[in-house]
């Protein structure tokens, strides 16, 4: 893909730098700004234009992508007139902060999409990177082609809080997997088995988790097909639900034995592209990949090696603070 649509990126940390790099690779004239100017050096060498202030960066392109530590930092970075700009905020945060920022940007004459990057920086710019967006669909569609330079985009709805909600839900899933790995490593560690030795089987189990999620989704769909339900009735006293579960498990086992990739249950004939587009499966798959990368990292830490971090800071939204979790529910 090569396109001439200009774009601005505010924030050049690990993730912001990866986003700007992906736009450059796709051919977009890219203006960048970062509080610490030196972080732009490499991008400027690759063709980016460094703006001297947030206002100058915002003025340089109609599409302004923001990716900084948190929403307070995003408010600092969005320091300039927003008339006629579309702000795409890929900073992690809570749904209420996303909605509040959407209102503020609208007050200042701009359009707003919120978003979450469900990928490590190294994956940005490939189809493997899944990015969740929410806000006006018309804005998303107008810029979907440019945003497509970053990875596979999914639009979750008009409410700007929805992408943050999805990001929370998926981070809970990812942290659950990482914590599960630590528990498993502790159990095996008690018998003298190293975390490295546990790694291959742990990664296989995470792959199975992806297939189980796909199985739950497929089973749910079948239950809701009214025309088919009549033919699936089981005799009184029968164990229909268990039978269905066993069929799904059998399919998954066959898939695992056939060595199919994460998230593809045996019998799922959709192409990889179709599967990635299905919002129900894409996010758990992306999180499986992130968790697998995180586990490799944790193992290296546990073994006392000096690991190369797969991601910089693993920012976890403050799920248990400020009522964010209750609000989500
Ligand atoms: N890294 C990942 O793997 C990953 C994955 C998914 C989502 N994310 C999300 O992406 C966002 C950025 O993460 P990151 O990994 O790029 O973090 P990072 O490497 O720590 O970079 C943080 C960025 O925020 C800027 N910043 C902080 N406070 C600021 C302020 N008050 N005003 C202006 N700029 C400010 C920093 O500027 P300076 O350079 O001047 O300090 C830097 O550009 C986070 O919300 C994170 O949750 C990251």
Image: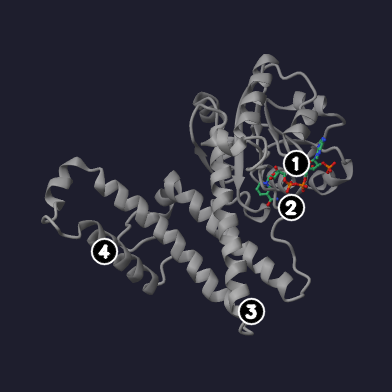
The numbered mark, 4 or 1, whose residue comes first in the sequence reads 1
Residue 171 screen position, x and y as percent = 59, 49
Q: Nearer the viewer, mark 2 or mark 3?
A: 3
The numbered mark, 4 or 2, whose residue comes first in the sequence reads 4
Q: Which of marks 3 and 1 is in front?
A: 3
The residue beneath circle 1 is 69
Question: Residue 313, which numbered label?
Answer: 2
The crowding category of the residue bearing disc 3, from other C-alpha atoms within 10 Å (few below 14, some 14 to 19, many at least 20), is some
Secondary structure at badge 3 equals helix
The numbered mark, 1 or 2, whose residue comes first in the sequence reads 1
The answer to whether residue 173 is left or right of residue 317 is left
Q: Is residue 129 visible?
A: no
The crowding category of the residue bearing disc 4, from other C-alpha atoms within 10 Å (few below 14, some 14 to 19, many at least 20), is some
The residue beneath circle 3 is 189
- Residue at 82% x, 49% y is 42
User: Relative to the observer, which residue lies in front, 24 or 237?
Assistant: 237
The crowding category of the residue bearing disc 1, from other C-alpha atoms within 10 Å (few below 14, some 14 to 19, many at least 20), is some
The numbered mark, 2 or 3, whose residue comes first in the sequence reads 3
Q: Does the residue labelled 2 lie within 8 Å of ligand 1?
A: yes
Secondary structure at badge 2 equals loop
The residue beneath circle 4 is 247
Q: Nearer the viewer, mark 3 or mark 4?
A: 3
Q: Does the residue labelled 1 lie within 8 Å of ligand 1?
A: yes
Q: Whole-Å distance between the Cαs marked 1 and 2?
A: 9 Å
The crowding category of the residue bearing disc 2, from other C-alpha atoms within 10 Å (few below 14, some 14 to 19, many at least 20), is few
The answer to whether residue 143 is left or right of residue 90 is left
Q: Whole-Å distance between the Cαs marked 4 and 1?
A: 45 Å
Q: Whole-Å distance between the Cαs marked 4 and 2?
A: 41 Å
Mark 1 and mark 2 in contact? Answer it, CB < 8 Å.
yes
The numbered mark, 3 or 4, whose residue comes first in the sequence reads 3
């Amino acid at each position: 893909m090569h396109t001439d649509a200009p774009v601005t990126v505010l924030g050049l940390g690990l993730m912001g730098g990866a986003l700007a790099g992906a736009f450059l690779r796709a051919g977009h004239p890219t203006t960048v700004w970062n509080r610490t100017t030196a972080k732009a050096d490499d991008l400027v060498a690759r063709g980016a234009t460094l703006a001297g202030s947030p206002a100058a960066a915002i003025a340089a392109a109609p599409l302004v992508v923001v990716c900084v530590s948190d929403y307070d930092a995003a408010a600092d970075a969005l320091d300039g007139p927003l008339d006629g700009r579309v702000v795409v905020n890929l900073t992690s945060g809570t749904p209420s902060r996303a909605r509040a920022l959407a209102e503020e940007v609208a007050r200042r004459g701009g359009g707003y999409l919120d978003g979450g990057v469900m990928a490590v920086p190294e994956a940005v710019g490939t189809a493997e990177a899944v990015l969740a967006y929410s806000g006006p669909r018309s804005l998303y569609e107008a810029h979907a082609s440019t945003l497509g330079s970053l990875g596979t985009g999914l639009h979750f709805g008009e409410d700007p809080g929805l992408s943050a909600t999805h990001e929370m839900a998926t981070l809970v899933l990812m942290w659950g997997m990482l914590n599960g790995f630590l528990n498993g490593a502790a159990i095996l560690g008690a018998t003298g088995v190293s975390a490295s030795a546990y790694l291959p089987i742990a990664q296989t189990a995470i792959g199975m988790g992806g297939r189980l999620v796909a199985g739950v989704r497929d089973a749910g769909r079948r239950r809701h097909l009214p025309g088919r339900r009549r033919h699936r009735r089981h005799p009184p006293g029968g164990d229909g639900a268990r039978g269905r579960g066993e069929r799904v498990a059998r399919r998954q086992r066959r898939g695992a034995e056939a060595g199919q990739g994460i998230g593809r249950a045996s019998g799922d004939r959709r192409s990889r592209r179709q599967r990635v587009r299905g919002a129900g499966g894409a996010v758990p798959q992306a999180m499986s990949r992130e968790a697998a990368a995180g586990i490799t990292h944790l193992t290296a830490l546990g073994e006392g090696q000096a690991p190369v971090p797969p991601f910089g800071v693993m920012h976890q939204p403050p799920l248990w603070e400020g009522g964010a979790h209750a609000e989500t529910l």
